[in-house]
Amino acid sequence: MFQKWTPRGAAPIALAVGLYAIPAMAQAQQAAAPIVLEEIIVTAERRSTNLQDTPIAITALTAEDLREKGVVDLKGVADATPNFQMTTSGNGSGGSNFAQLFIRGVGQPDFIITKDPAVGIYIDGVYLARAPGAVLELLDIERVEVLRGPQGTLFGKNTSGGALNISTKAPSDEFGGVAELRVGNYGRMDVGGSVNVPLVEDKLALRVSALSRDQDGYYKRLLPSADGTKRNGNDVNVRSGRATLAWTPTDTLQVTLSGDVTRERQAATDYQAVGIFNTAAAAPNIELYNRVVLAPQGLTYDNRWVAPKPWTTYSTSTSYANSDVWGVSGVVDWDPGVIGVKSITAYRDLDVRSKADADGTPADIVASAGISVQQHQFSQEFQFSGDAFDDRLNWLVGLWYFEEKAQDTQSSRQLVGLVEALRAAPNRSIAPPGVAASTCPATGTGPASCLGGANNANNLRYDQMRLGNRWLDGSSYAAFAHAGYKVTDAFSLTAGARISKEKKDFRYYEVRPLQNNLVSFNNVTAGDTWDVFTPKLGAEYKFDSNMMAYVSWSKGFKAGGVNGRPTRADLFNTFDPEKLTAYEAGFKGDFFDRRLRLNLAAYFSEYNDIQITRNTTDSTGAFIRLETNGGDGEIKGLEAEATALLAEGLTLQAGLGYTDFKFTKLLPQQATAGTILLSLKNELPFVPKFTGNLGLTYEVPVSADGAAVRLRGDWRHSSSYFIDIDNTAAVAQDAYDVFDGRITFVPAAGGWELFLAMSNIGNKAVIANGVASPANGNQMVTYKPPRMTYGGIRVTF
């Protein structure tokens, strides 16, 4: 029995095969029932439109797409989308629930509350402001839309790269549900399901869903942890639920109330060392640490602690990645027939805590008492929409208000034990890095620059213990309008604009325990207000009912912020919003009686006041953190996606993305003597030039009564890319290819299915994130999951 599929994608080989095969197959099956691609409805323009009529570069993944690809959270969405990268646990945080998203080269490689993301996440129209807790479980999802390019008019701030528009399944008037069980390697056990219950016929319905996911960690610890166990990193322990109540008192009014909650209790993301350097020239602090702290213990910090292979680590610190995230929302949709009115009211709260071994070795080069982020937000949006001039004009205007309060606490220490060892040594008896030992004899007669002694102020140069608290109080106001006008039946114009006011106030408090609890930052404050205008203009031309082309010009912005990890008072500085202006041309078409779908886009973007984060050093070798506007650049690229129904039951899908970035201007860089500056040749992190994906689904009848086996294979490719703005080669990712497979048995009567799947069949080690710290002489990475196998049963009723 044939079923319709709606996957997406495009690659040159796939297109060539599809274009060659489709005409012949179409002729051979003229007498058969039509096999066509289904229409996909999206809400990228804040109203329901056909994907093929929407002048935006969109990858739309349906619930079936997500299931066939084995996608359980947002990380899997990126693998199926051209020019989209997603990772977690930036800056050595270990936070497996800290989302970092990049679309068309624009993103945010950090989680700190003093910096905003560049790709907005929206779930049922509600904006999620923070990276922590944003690796969403895709629980009872109707559709995920990846909108590429700035969405500053309709979606607002922090969408300069694009937006993820997620729609959950709505309650309906029919009783039914689904339950699914998955088991796999590493002790995987997933149990989930949903049920829809009509409470009052045609008036009131309730939908409830729940999920439990558990899996042992795939990162093997080679040494016992500090707590005496060997709990492997990167495990899974998630509980999630959602309830939605829909009330429809009249044909023109619907009220929807929704609540969701997610709880995670996991081991943190483990890191492994891939490079260690400890000479006075390369890492003066580490040379001193080896000499003063480790040598007396018969130890040394060197390449012996480089992990022997991927997914292994010498980490020993106790780690965790815990989160409690919940939210409620209310949507009122009233459409009396002239002007539609929609209100979206939402409140969300998160409490995220993580602790990781941030150097990947048993030495306490980088130690942490943990990171905690608490944030709550309120948002209110009003939309007014309608049609005019015999439906030639469609329009939407709106108002948006958003406020949040957040606190970020981080207790960290580097070079643990060094200051204590220096204080315990005789006065002026230890030579600084790069200085001959004879210069500072044990008699204490060395020059004033020598280290050692209980009261020697020089020792404090190596005090890297900080207990910091950051507070954010932010608010946003916006008014926006968007309209489309059909000049003729074939030619349309689009225009929109948004005026946004962004206000942020920051406060920072820091204590230095090794200096008698010196308050180094005593509730210092910084803040700013920004007014931003983000317009959009476009034109579309429909060649016929199946083909259209469009051009657009649009702007987006990512809010400004402050350096939230200042290592000196002069580094506690604000930075401006980054802005992006995009020029785009696209084509969307269905061919061969809707058996081939091809969507293309080409773009050029001017990227100004690019926000950057750097872990670097000054002339003394001391660690400093820079967060500032780095300069301006240009991004150009191409995207192609296609779906081809090659035969009954045989579907091919593919995607191809190309992105090329270059700096055109560098702003004066905040630094001190000894800091290596960026150059125009530096590349942005997580920006591969090429990304591609290819999938093939084939449903094979296995019995006369209609039972079938569905075979699925996926390939995805990425060219090489850097992980950090300094383009450190040791933590860069080489080009790679990954293959996945799935087989599903579908009985003739339906109602259930059995499946068996394997991801990363070739066991390819792909870097998920990395940190290079010159001051600490280490280069670390963490890898995406290795080969995973799982199987299960899915029951519908």
Image (tube, rainbow, N blue to C red):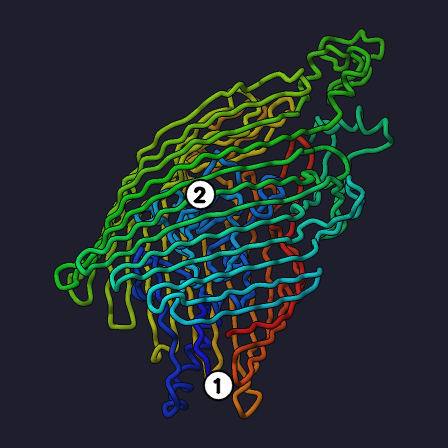
- Provide residue 583's location: percent of width, then percent of height: 32, 51
Q: Which residue is mark 2?
A: 129
Check disc 2 and give the amino acid type. Ala
Under tag 2, what secondary structure?
loop
Residue, x 77% and y 14% (percent of image)?
Answer: 452
Check disc 1 and give the amino acid type. Met
Query: In this orientation, which residue lies closer to the viewer: 619 or 191?
Result: 191
Taking the view exactly as shown, the residue that stands out farthest to the front is: 200
On residue 1, the disc is 1
Report crowding for label 1: few under 14, some 14 to 19, many 20 or more residues within 10 A (C-alpha). some
Tell which circle, 2 or 1, labels the residue nearer the N-terminal end: 1
Residue, x 73% and y 10% (percent of image)?
Answer: 455
Query: In this orientation, which residue lies closer to the viewer: 773 or 346?
Result: 346
- Provide residue 67's location: percent of width, then percent of height: 52, 67
Q: Disc 2 to disc 1, how far (Cα)?
A: 45 Å
Residue, x 46% and y 25% (percent of image)?
Answer: 573
Q: Is residue 484 left or right of residue 534?
A: left
